[in-house]
């Protein structure tokens, strides 16, 4: 078994280190291992895996949510969010800095993407905050942390991937992400208030938002109307049992098109950009999923998953010890791999280990999403940091420093979820009853 595991790691690292596409690297590693160590008709096997993974019913929602995110990315939604939220955010310590967190939370509920959330909210908020004299460190740091909520607040693209690979209900995952997502956003807002009180120079004293009346605040709510209706249509139709995740995704696309139309964001060029962006994203995810499926089945055929599970079980780690090791593992992996690659690469091995330790697969899905969120703000391969670098021109190292408090909050939050798993499991159990 040592030879098999060593060979797999060497082949995988060589392929990924060569710069080859991750999906192809995963597929090539699994295929090579089967050819070397098992007498299996690899051609027939690859054809069957390709058909099985790409025709999975749960994946139907994914392309639709991707299209919806692409449409909304090219609307004036970010300006509407800022206009609607800024009068209300002025009531809290830190004032307009909370637009980053609340705006990211709201947009996360319709995009499913962390990078898109960071880009859309940051496109307007960073310029406004800088113009009004807010400190760059707290502006960029709060957006880096809050932008990660795009993965945790449903609907989430990465939750759909986990549901398919882990054979877990996507709807239950969406439900399980609601309470942790709101609580984590609240933690971020709490830190913004604490940070701005400790360092009052980060918030301008002559901020014009201090002069806003209640009449202006209530009139600003009309700017939040379209996005709130879209959230209600998507999540409300799912949780009420009216629509499946795939059907609610189609509702979301229709709603996004209507928003783009009334905001005059639908042009021939924007439609072309939406189509090309959606096709590229879907093709990338499909290739990664296919490669991960081949590699995961190869590890099962070779007995690698069972061997590693047995080795970890023999260590007799406490639940918190196991969680600490997994956090460390994913933070290290996040320095080199994107979130999708981390999940598909590790899930076939890690999921059996955590379920054997007594953790619920739904709970572990939320745990995994949060640690993948951590990878979004850890250099050198932190996608949110790349987005912010493009928006602000600040180097990756400095951005990672600004985001560090939010990374620590997420680490502590994961341990809270391990201590109180009902934070994750209460809502799906309450709504779906004994089906859990």
Image (cartoon, grey):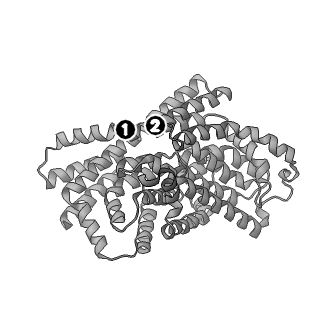
Looking at the image, which residue is at 54% across and 47% down?
115
Within the image, what quadrant is residue 137 found in?
bottom right
Q: Secondary structure at mark 2?
A: helix
- Quadrant of the frame with the C terminus: bottom left
> Label 1 vs label 2: CA separation?
9 Å
Position of 129 with respect to 409 (left or right) is right
| Callout 2 crowding tier (Cα within 10 Å): few <14, some 14–19, many ≥20 | some
Against 313, residue 388 (above or below) is: above
Which residue lies at the image location 60% right of the left edge and 60% below the top edge? Answer: 183
Q: Is residue 17 found left or right of 415 in the rendered image? A: left
Q: Which residue is mark 1?
A: 57
Question: Residue 56 location in percent, x, y?
Answer: 34, 39
Report the front residue among 268 and 221: 221
Q: Secondary structure at mark 1?
A: helix
Question: What is the tally of numbered marks visible in this picture?
Answer: 2
Q: Is residue 374 above or below residue 51?
A: below
Q: Position of residue 193 (x, y in %)?
A: 73, 63
Assess whether mark 2 and mark 1 are in contact (beta carbons under 8 angstroms).
Answer: yes
Residue 108 picture location, percent across and down: 58, 47
Identify residue for label 2.
Answer: 246
The residue at 29%/55% (across/down) is 12
Looking at the image, which is closer to me, 120 or 371? 371
Among the two numbered marks 1 and 2 on one chain, the one whose residue lies closer to the N terminus: 1
238 or 406: nearer the eye?
A: 238
Residue placed at 40% from the left, 65% from the top? 359
Rendered view: 94 above or below 261: below
Q: Is residue 172 above or below residue 6?
A: above
Residue 391, disc: none
For residue 84, say whether it is visible. Answer: yes
State which quarter of the image contains the N terminus.
bottom left
- Is 83 on the left or on the right of 68, as rendered? right
């Amino acid at each position: 078994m040592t030879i098999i595991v060593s060979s797999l790691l060497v082949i995988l690292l060589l392929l990924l280190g060569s710069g080859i596409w991750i999906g192809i690297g995963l597929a090539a590693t699994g295929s090579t291992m089967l050819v070397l160590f098992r007498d299996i008709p690899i051609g027939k096997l690859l054809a069957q895996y390709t058909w099985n993974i790409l025709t999975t019913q749960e994946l139907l929602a994914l392309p639709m949510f991707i299209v919806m995110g692409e449409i909304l990315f090219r609307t004036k939604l970010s300006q509407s969010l800022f206009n609607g939220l800024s009068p209300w955010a002025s009531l809290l310590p830190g004032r307009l800095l909370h637009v980053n967190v609340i705006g990211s939370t709201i947009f996360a509920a319709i995009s499913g993407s962390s990078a898109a959330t960071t880009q859309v909210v940051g496109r307007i908020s960073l310029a406004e905050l800088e113009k009004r004299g807010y400190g760059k460190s707290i502006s960029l740091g709060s957006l880096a942390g809050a932008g990660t909520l795009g993965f945790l607040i449903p609907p989430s693209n990465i939750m759909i991937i986990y549901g398919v690979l882990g054979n877990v209900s996507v709807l239950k995952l969406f439900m399980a992400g609601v309470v942790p997502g709101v609580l984590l956003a609240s933690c971020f807002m709490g830190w913004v208030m604490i940070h701005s009180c400790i360092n009052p120079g980060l918030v301008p004293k002559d901020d014009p938002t201090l002069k806003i009346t209640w009449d202006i605040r209530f009139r600003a709510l009309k700017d939040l109307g379209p996005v709130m209706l879209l959230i209600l249509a998507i999540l409300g139709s799912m949780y009420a049992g009216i629509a499946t995740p795939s059907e609610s995704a189609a509702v979301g696309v229709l709603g996004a098109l209507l928003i783009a139309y009334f905001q005059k964001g639908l042009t021939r060029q924007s439609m072309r950009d939406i189509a090309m962006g959606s096709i590229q994203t879907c093709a990338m995810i499909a290739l990664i999923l296919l490669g991960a499926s081949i590699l995961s089945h190869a590890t099962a055929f070779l007995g690698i998953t069972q061997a590693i599970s047995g080795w970890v079980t023999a260590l007799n780690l406490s639940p918190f010890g196991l969680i600490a090791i997994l956090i460390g593992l994913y933070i290290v992996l996040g320095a080199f791999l994107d979130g999708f690659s981390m999940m598909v690469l590790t899930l076939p091995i890690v999921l059996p280990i955590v379920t054997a330790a007594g953790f619920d697969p739904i709970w572990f899905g939320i745990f995994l999403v949060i640690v993948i969120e951590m990878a979004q703000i850890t250099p050198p391969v932190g996608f949110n940091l790349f987005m912010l670098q493009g928006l602000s021109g600040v180097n990756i190292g400095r951005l990672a420093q600004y985001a560090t408090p939010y990374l620590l909050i997420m680490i502590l939050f994961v341990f809270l979820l391990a201590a109180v798993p009902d934070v994750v499991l209460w809502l799906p159990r309450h709504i779906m009853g004994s089906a859990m």
